[in-house]
Image (cartoon, helix red, strand yellow):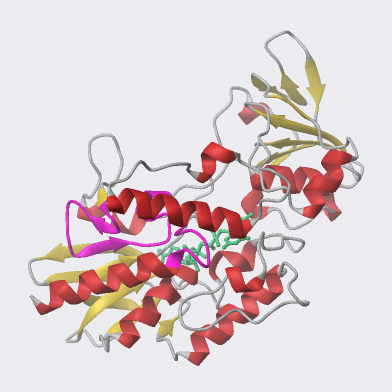
Amino acid sequence: SPDQTHTFDAVVIGGGQAGLACGYYLRRAKLDYIILDDQDEPGGAWRHTWPSLRLFSPASFASLPGWFMPEYDSGGFPPREHVLDYLRRYEHRYQLPVRRPVTAHSVSSDASGFAVETSGGIFQGRTIISATGTWRQPHCPTYPGLADFSGRHIHSAHYTGPDSFVGQRVAVVGGGNSGAQIAAELAPLTTLSWLTSRPPRYLPDDVDGRILFQVATEYARNVTAGRPAGNKITDLGDIVAVPEVRKARDAGILVAEPMFERITADGAAWADGTTRAFDTIIWCTGFRPAVGPLKDLHLRTIDGHIATHGTQAAADSRVFLVGYGDWTGPASATLLGVGRTARDTVAAIQRYLGA
Ligand code: FAD
């Protein structure tokens, strides 16, 4: 259990890739810090993605600061195990002080700093970095009738592969990457309905994570320099045409249909009166930032949003939010992209501590 008389320069909540990237720069700055993670093992959300998931870029475009991800299969797109192995070795290489499993429940503050109440006692810090990611906060839209649905429904966060769905009537809901990839995997094995609220928008076939990263970088540079921002990734499309998705789409088995209007006891109904039976609904409807532990800090504005300048909370300049995506830094929810926001965050922490 922690020493209650000790106050860290920074307490990092979350030991996924974002927490590790912050650790890298905190260590380089010779600051006194600790990383708290609720998992049993290294890897963050990558531990929970489905087994067939591959990165959408080669390893060299999926590296954290300081040490390149080892190449996979001479330039191929690495599978999840490769990422997990990399994160484990990264942690070890830089001897990052990660305590796990430690769940942060809440954070309270006073003029001198913060007390983080956890499953492993209270940790005190002069600053806080929230790097809790999003997978702990899967988002499902509410549809009338769901409570009476007799089938099974799960979120993509809990999808572990096609085995338990073979031969079933499955609705995959959502037109993003998770929806497309899971639908592509299930299409040949199930009676699939892929349901999206608007027609799926594929990125051009030759666009993978490399180009996405360039687009995000250019966008960030333009914004910083006060130039016209140019394209955001989401202006170009939603779905990376990874090989599995492209194959299913080109074979004509990955066809999207409009969303239903409500759920029935044995399936769903559309506005025009059509009904269809489903054994399972898989919600591929995204995630929200897992910022529950920060609730007592009252960082949210009236509209429910946490306002930030870069990664720094507008309501308390000693609180930083890293890794949640464009909200706190372009491409910061990617392995390559989070490094830049982690670096800027630690620089801001050094300025605060030095002042
Ligand atoms: P996480 O990995 O979720 O880490 C946060 C950690 O904090 C977790 O261990 C979590 O359990 C822990 N935590 C949460 N709450 C608490 C708490 N209260 N107390 C203690 N610990 C807590 N990125 C790429 O770069 N390339 C890709 O090809 C790619 N493909 C993707 C495909 C899919 C389907 C998805 C969903 C994401 C993909 N990403 C990809 C995006 C990105 O890399 C991940 O979302 C990444 O896991 C985010 O890292 P993180 O460190 O911010 O969050």
Q: Nearer the viewer, residue 153 or 34?
A: 34
Q: Is residue 307 left or right of residue 101?
A: left
* Residue found at x 74% / y 9%: 273
Q: Quadrant of the C terminus?
A: bottom left
Up/down of 327 relative to 132, above or below: above
Q: Any magenta on residue 201? A: no
Quarter placement of the N terminus: bottom left
Of residue 323 and residue 193, the one placed in the foreground of this image is 323
Q: Please state the horizontal and vertical placement of residue 303, each as a whole percent of the image.
A: 28, 34
- Say left or right for 237 vs 333: right
On screen, 32 above or below 321?
Answer: below
- Residue 297 image-quadrant placement: bottom left
- Segment colored magenta: 309-338
Q: Measured from the top left, where is residue 68 in percent x and y?
A: 56, 80
Q: Residue at x 43, y 74 (%)?
A: 21
Instruction: Name above or below for residue 226 compared with residue 144.
Output: below
Q: Position of residue 80 (x, y in %)?
A: 69, 69
From the image, give the main secondary structure of the stretch colored magenta: loop
Whether residue 291 appears in this view of the structure is: no
Q: Residue furthest top?
A: 272
Q: Is residue 257 left or right of residue 212?
A: right
* Magenta region includes residue 334: yes
Question: In the image, residue 210 lies at what x, y percent?
Answer: 60, 60
Residue at 38% of width from left, 43% of height from top?
229
Residue 277 shows up from this direction: yes
Q: Residue at x 50, y 91 (%)?
A: 93
The answer to whether 156 appears left or right of 254 in the picture is left
